[in-house]
Image (tube, rainbow, N blue to C red):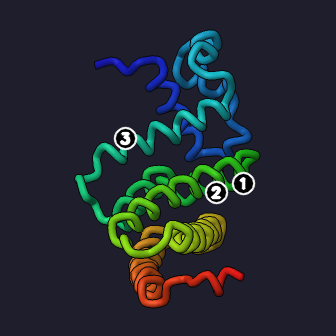
Amino acid sequence: MKPTAKQAIQASFRTLLMAKSLDKITVRDIVEDCGITRNTFYYHYEDIYDLFDDYLDTRIYETWQELPKNCPWDQALSALLESIFETPRMGRHIFYSKKQDAMRQYLNKLLSSILQSHAANVAHRITFEDRKMICDACCYALYGMLEQWLTGPDAGMLHHNLQRLLQCFSGAIHQAFAYCVDHPQSKEDIL
């Protein structure tokens, strides 16, 4: 089956993102690579950054659909992150772009969603505020480590490092939840 124009544009974008920075990819590059007109591109997207947002949404949706039902949170997160950052080079091309802040917000939203869902399943007896605080702390730490690995010299170790970090975080999250159950926050703690 012949890919649609939108699929061809995304495939071209993916290939170009592996080769050069997000900020250096032009509509002209994509049009020439796909063999489509500029009007066709602009029919689907406002600009490269609109395409980037749609590309992320598509990658996340496709990966999410492939995950088995009741997939453990750390495996789901690993699969989703690896679908976005297929190669360390691609990750650097995203992180060193004007969309860095948008990417940070996108990843924080994704990480928070996965961790909040996991927390709701395993931590029934702790307050929403404690769950949110634990999830937020984990999100910031995971994002910081991910950014450091993608932009650092050992980016090739991303998969291994991510797997190990998620194993460690899994234990830390469960300990934090257990602590909150054993030591509920009292009204005096708030004051």
Marks 2/1: CA–CA distance: 6 Å
Q: Give, as a three-letter code, the residue at label 1.
A: Tyr
**Position of residue 23 measured from the top left corner of the image (x, y, whole percent):** 73, 41
Quadrant where the N terminus sits is: top left
Assign a secondary structure to mark 1.
loop
Q: Earlier in the sequence, mark 2 or mark 3?
A: 3
Q: Give, as a three-letter code, the residue at label 2.
A: Arg
Relative to 179, 24 lies left or right = right
Return the residue at label 1. Answer: 96
Return the residue at label 2. Answer: 92
Q: Nearer the viewer, mark 3 or mark 1?
A: 3
State if disc 1 and disc 2 touch (CB < 8 Å): yes
Return the residue at label 3. Answer: 62
Q: Give, as a three-letter code, the residue at label 3.
A: Glu
Q: Is residue 7 visible?
A: yes
Instruction: Name the residue located 43 percent from the left edge and 89 percent from the top edge.
Output: 182
Task: Give 177 or 93, whichever is nearer the viewer.
Answer: 177
Instruction: Name the residue located 41 percent from the left edge and 18 percent from the top edge.
Output: 4
Assign a secondary structure to mark 3.
helix
The answer to which quarter of the image holds residue 118 is: bottom left
**150 above or below 125?**
above
Instruction: Name the residue located 30 percent from the left edge and 65 percent from the top edge.
Output: 72
Q: Nearer the viewer, mark 2 or mark 3?
A: 3
The answer to which quarter of the image holds residue 32 is: top right
**Position of residue 153 measured from the top left corner of the image (x, y, whole percent):** 63, 73
Marks 2/3: CA–CA distance: 22 Å
Marks 3/1: CA–CA distance: 25 Å
**2 above or below 140?**
above
Task: Give 99 or 122, whichever is nearer the viewer.
Answer: 122
